[in-house]
Amino acid sequence: MNGADILGYSASAVTVFTFLPQVLKTWKEKSAKNVSLMMFVIAFVNEVMWIAYGVMINNMVIIVTNVIMIAMCTIMIALKLRYNKE
Amino acid sequence: MNGADILGYSASAVTVFTFLPQVLKTWKEKSAKNVSLMMFVIAFVNEVMWIAYGVMINNMVIIVTNVIMIAMCTIMIALKLRYNKE
């Protein structure tokens, strides 16, 4: 494993945590008024595409990264819809 | 170019637009109270890592994707800081 590989895996590991602060903030504040639902819908569709791509080229890093992200994304969409109603 | 390549490029193209709805929503509403600053700070640092990785492995798709995303991310951080003050 060379320097570029290490950087690539590190970047993937950080990507996984992108949506976590938003999920935690929304959970705590019980409001997502200013959060764009469309952003997470685009991300959700995009992650389905990335997972399909990962399966097609048999790349576990892409699959695992996007399965975690789609889980966060699903929680965020559920929180947004729930607090929008209230 | 096979089916997997086409799906990979399409997924990259969609990824680029992930933050756009949030930027437009914040711009219109002039508020980002419920938006997590930390999410965009993590994304910013992450995109720097991806750009460095793209340069190291000489992959233009990774470089271009993340240059566009870091631009969106920078606008979003600027909007968040601006409307937080008001």
Image: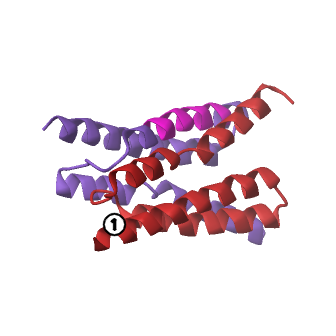
Chain colours: A red, B purple
Q: Which of B4 and B30 is in front in this view?
A: B30
User: Where, by quadrant of the figure, is residue B40 drawn?
Assistant: top left
Q: Is residue A14 above or below residue B65?
A: above
Q: Which of A56 and B26 is in front in this view?
A: B26
Residue A62 colored magenta? Answer: no
Residue visible at 59% across and 35% down?
B51
Residue visible at 81% across and 54% down?
A60
User: Going by the image, does A28 lie left or right of A42?
Assistant: left
- x%, y% of residue B20? 38, 56
Quadrant housing the C terminus of chain B? top left
Quadrant housing the N terminus of chain B? bottom right
**Please, which chain is the residue tagged with disc 1 on?**
A
User: Going by the image, does A39 lie left or right of A18?
Assistant: left
Label 1 amino acid? Tyr
**Name of the residue lying farthest toward the top:** A3
Magenta part, dominant SS: helix
| Res. B74 in view | yes
Q: Nearer the viewer, residue B71 or A61?
A: A61
Q: Name the residue under label 1.
A: A83
Residue visible at 43% across and 49% down?
A22
- The range drawn in magenta is B41-53
Residue B52 colored magenta? Answer: yes
- x%, y% of residue A83? 33, 66
User: Where, by quadrant of the figure, is residue A14 drawn?
Assistant: top right
**Name of the residue lying farthest toward the left:** B86
- Callout 1: few (<14), some (14-19), or many (20+) C-alpha neighbours within 10 Å? some
User: Where, by quadrant of the figure, is residue B77 drawn?
Assistant: top left
| Res. B1 in view | no
